[in-house]
Amino acid sequence: MPWDVGVEQQQSWERHADYRSEKQCQRSSYAFYCAVRDLLPVWALEDMRTMEVFHWEDDGQACSFTPSEALLYTLVHDHQQYARYLLNRYSVRALEMPSRSFCCCQTHAAPPHLSVAVRYNRTSILRMMMAQVKDFSTETERRVYLNSRGGCAHSADAGKTPVHLACDLARPECLLLLLGHGACPYLADHTGLNPLDCLLHHMCHAPSNMAADAHRMRECLGYLLLFMPKPNFQLKDELLKNPQLWQRLVGEEAFNWLAGLTPPSLFVQAMQSLTQSIPAEQMDALPDFLKPLDFRLQNV
């Protein structure tokens, strides 16, 4: 029938128009990605984000990038000036969950910003993010955000807290920022292992020729012990079965403490009290002999 042909033709035009719109969104999204990658000025990026650039949602809608989604791009490309603007201008809105086009498991995952910051080792931007976490309306919201198990269910980060990820990837600076701002070092991941278990497992199985990785893992161990007055982990029996190996890996004093053979030294106890009583952002102002770095190198 003639009218049937007209309806089919109209539907074809509509599908073609949707296809062209989607392709246009893909081009503009890539343009924004490149603009952040090329570290364009903040004003230019904000003009693009609010007026020129769109991405395609699953429901067929073209949407502009949210501050949260723009912040993810700054983390990938380490655009610190743009990250500072987004966090100062939008505060916790920049830390919200992005749309489904950025995370296919949105209903189950937490906002990915902390995990992305740790994975890319963006310590400067992570420090800015930690400064904004205090703006959550309640202490409960802040702790939930810091300790959330993020990551898409299809990714390697699934079920891991940011602290877990920092230990997995040996990111000592990120780990200190997270712990110093209240992230919990005791939470288990989806496999039932807490960050200390994960770190000890990686230390035991790390290639012997990776001296830099071993050093960073020892740094992470030092920070964990500073924020874990009572180490609680599942690998204690493994330490006792092979003491010579673990003394070599973690140091004699740390081994004795972890194995429950001796209490921590008075210096370590004092450092634990100090790190829990001052804000993390003041850690750099401490004299060198009181900084956790000295604790790590001398006592772990």
Image (cartoon, rainbow, N blue to C red):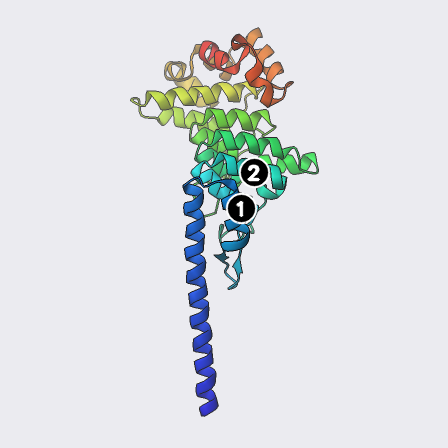
At label 1, which amino acid type do we have?
Glu
Q: Which mark is residue 37?
A: none
Mark 2 touching mark 1, by CB under 8 A? yes
Q: Nearer the viewer, residue 34 or 178?
A: 34
At label 2, which amino acid type do we have?
Tyr
Q: Is residue 22 above or below residue 169?
A: below
Q: Is residue 2 above or below residue 289?
A: below
Image spot of residue 62 (x, y percent): 51, 60
Residue visible at 51% across and 41% down? Answer: 42
> Which of the 4 image quadrants contains residue 136?
top right
- In the rendered view, does 290 fall on the left or right side of 198? right
In this view, the residue farthest toward the bottom is 1
Label 1: element kind: helix
Image spot of residue 254 (x, y percent): 47, 14
Q: To which residue does mark 1 refer?
A: 46
- In the rendered view, does 24 fall on the left or right side of 94? left
Residue visible at 42% across and 51% down? Answer: 31
Q: Nearer the viewer, residue 75 or 30?
A: 30
Mark 2 Cα shell of 10 Å, populated few (<14), some (14-19), many (≥20): some
Q: To which residue does mark 2 refer?
A: 85
Residue visible at 40% across and 17% down? Answer: 246
Mark 2 vs mark 1, CA separation in Å: 10 Å
Image spot of residue 65 (x, y percent): 53, 51
Which of disc 1 and disc 2 is earlier in sequence? 1
Q: Nearer the viewer, residue 278 or 185?
A: 278
